[in-house]
Image (cartoon, helix red, strand yellow):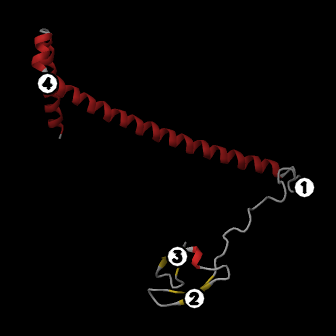
Amino acid sequence: MIITCPCDKKKFEIDAALIPKEGRDLECGSCGHVWFYKIEKKIPEPLTLKENILDNKDNFTKEDEPSLNQNFEKTKIKEKNIKRKKTENNFISKFFSYLIVFIISMVAAIILIDTFKKPLIDIFPGLEIVLFNLFETLKDIKLFIIDLS
């Protein structure tokens, strides 16, 4: 259990078994302040609803119904807008995640192809022209990106 000194300078972790039900005096090791501390229950019993508001028709009149419906509709519209924004944000973040994975995969594939270019050309002789064109295209893209900045 964590106990805070009344001067709010220090917090202490104390075993709850060291404090009896009737309480005891504690002394702050930081400022020397002495105070009486008693363990209190945060919530003595669960909160319960004593009457059902929906069944109690005396609380509302027919005049109140339109305003209640309007408030309910406004709340529903706000919830839909929040859900829509979350969905749009999720879509955008997923899209960029997939885009980054795709780019990294393509770079890895190009590095693998470049590494094993000689054995691949020995197995597939027509692949030499395709690989040459691929690497020339990549050089052109690199030059284009450099020219942009």
Residue 34, image x, y percentages? 54, 90
Asked if marks 4 and 3 touch (Cβ < 8 Å), the reply is no
Q: Amino acid at mark 1?
A: Asp
The residue lying at 48 percent from left, 77 percent from top is 11
Count of picture labels: 4
Disc 4 on helix, strand or loop? helix
Q: Out of 140 and 34, give the one closest to the viewer.
A: 34
Q: Quadrant of the N terminus?
A: bottom right
- Give the Cα distance between marks 4 and 1: 81 Å
Q: Amino acid at mark 2?
A: Trp
Report whether residue 128 is seen.
no
Asked if marks 4 and 1 touch (Cβ < 8 Å), the reply is no
- Give the Cα distance between marks 2 and 4: 76 Å
Mark toward the viewer: 3 or 1: 3
For this orientation, the residue located farthest to the front is 17
Mark toward the viewer: 2 or 1: 2
Asked if marks 2 and 4 touch (Cβ < 8 Å), the reply is no
Mark found first going from the N terminus, 3 or 1: 3
Residue on which disc 3 sits = 14
Using the image, tell me which numbered label, if any, was put on residue 58: 1
Residue on which disc 2 sits = 35
Mark toward the viewer: 4 or 3: 3
- Give the Cα distance between marks 4 and 3: 65 Å
Is 45 on the left-hand or right-hand side of 58? Answer: left
Task: Report crowding for label 2: few under 14, some 14 to 19, many 20 or more residues within 10 A (C-alpha).
Answer: few
Task: Report crowding for label 4: few under 14, some 14 to 19, many 20 or more residues within 10 A (C-alpha).
Answer: few
Residue on which disc 4 sits = 114
Vertical position of residue 10 compared to residue 79: above or below: below
The residue lying at 14 percent from left, 15 percent from top is 120
